[in-house]
Image (spheres, rainbow, N blue to C red):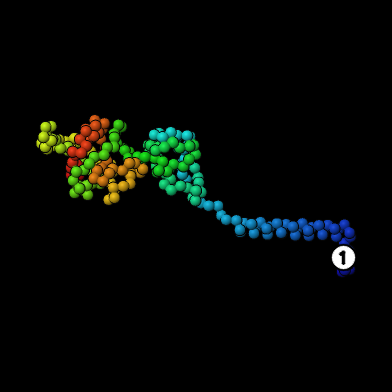
């Protein structure tokens, strides 16, 4: 059986080493506690949302294409109202100039998607309906004919009607208050609708202003 040995007292160098180790341990624990406290007090990063921004300076009247747009992540509190979602701006027309990096909104564009799917050269033209009962039955996408009253050039009396537009699509119908627009576009005034027509028919409708009647076609 081996005899018990008495631990040797620590020398000055060993005591200094132990004191230094305890100090480093205390400093490390204090730093860790401070880091935990800061993490607990720091607010979390705000959620972000993808928005469309201008890839470069763009002038008023520019028709937006994919090359004009970039996706950017913005904190939700900094995303403006009406911000256009990715895929919703191509083909829109800028109502005013925008700077590179500016988020695009419905207030900065006009007619976004209004003529989407229509043949090239199609124009959106305002036409007075003429009959309030017909206006109540109209919806965007309805097909209509537009007739114009003809008058005697001398007396001004009505002599009949001529068909100015045939089987054209209604793009927008005014709200009950007659205000507001479709995706930022100029809304038709109360008692009128926006229809999609070619350039020649648009001229004929303009010439017939004040004499038109809209007739709803059967689906």
Instruction: Name above or below for residue 157 compared with residue 79.
Output: above
Mark 1: few, some, or many residues within 10 Å (few <14, many ≥20)?
few
Instruction: Name above or below for residue 149 compared with residue 41.
Output: above
Residue 39: x %, y % from top left: 62, 56
Between 83 and 162, the one lying in front of the other is: 162
Q: Is residue 65 visible?
A: no
Between 110 and 112, the one lying in front of the other is: 110
Residue 10: x %, y % from top left: 87, 62
Between 186 and 102, the one lying in front of the other is: 186
Q: Residue at x 17, y 37 (%)?
A: 148
Instruction: Name above or below for residue 112 compared with residue 12.
Output: above
Q: Is residue 101 left or right of residue 93?
A: right
Badge 1 marks a residue whose secondary structure is loop
Total tally of numbered discs in the picture: 1
The quadrant the N terminus occupies is: bottom right
Q: Is residue 42 left or right of residue 66?
A: right
Residue 70: x %, y % from top left: 47, 39
Quarter location, residue 29: bottom right
Q: Which residue is mark 1?
A: 7
Q: Residue furthest front?
A: 155
Quarter location, residue 16: bottom right
Q: Residue at x 39, y 38 (%)?
A: 95
Instruction: Name above or below for residue 43 compared with residue 115.
Output: below
Q: Residue at x 11, y 32 (%)?
A: 154
Q: Is residue 45 visible?
A: yes
């Amino acid at each position: 059986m081996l005899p018990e040995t008495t631990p040797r007292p620590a020398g000055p160098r060993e005591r200094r080493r132990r004191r230094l180790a305890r100090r480093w341990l205390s400093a490390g624990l204090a730093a860790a506690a401070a880091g935990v406290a800061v993490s607990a007090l720091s607010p979390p990063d705000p959620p972000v949302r993808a928005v469309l921004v201008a890839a470069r300076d763009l002038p008023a009247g520019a028709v937006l294409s994919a090359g004009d747009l970039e996706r950017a992540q913005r904190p939700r509190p900094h995303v403006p109202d009406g911000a256009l979602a990715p895929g919703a701006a191509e083909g829109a027309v800028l109502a005013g100039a925008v700077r590179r990096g500016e988020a695009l909104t419905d207030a900065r564009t006009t007619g976004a998607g209004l003529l989407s799917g229509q043949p090239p050269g199609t124009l959106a033209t305002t036409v007075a309906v003429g009959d309030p009962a017909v206006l109540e039955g109209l919806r965007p996408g309805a097909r209509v004919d537009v007739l114009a009253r003809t008058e005697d050039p001398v007396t001004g009396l009505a002599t009949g009607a001529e068909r100015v537009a045939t089987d054209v699509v209604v793009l927008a119908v005014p709200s009950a208050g007659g205000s507001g627009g479709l995706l930022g576009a100029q809304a038709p005034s109360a008692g009128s609708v926006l229809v999609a027509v070619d350039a020649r028919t648009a001229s004929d409708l303009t010439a017939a202003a004040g004499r038109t009647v809209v007739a709803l076609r059967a689906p």
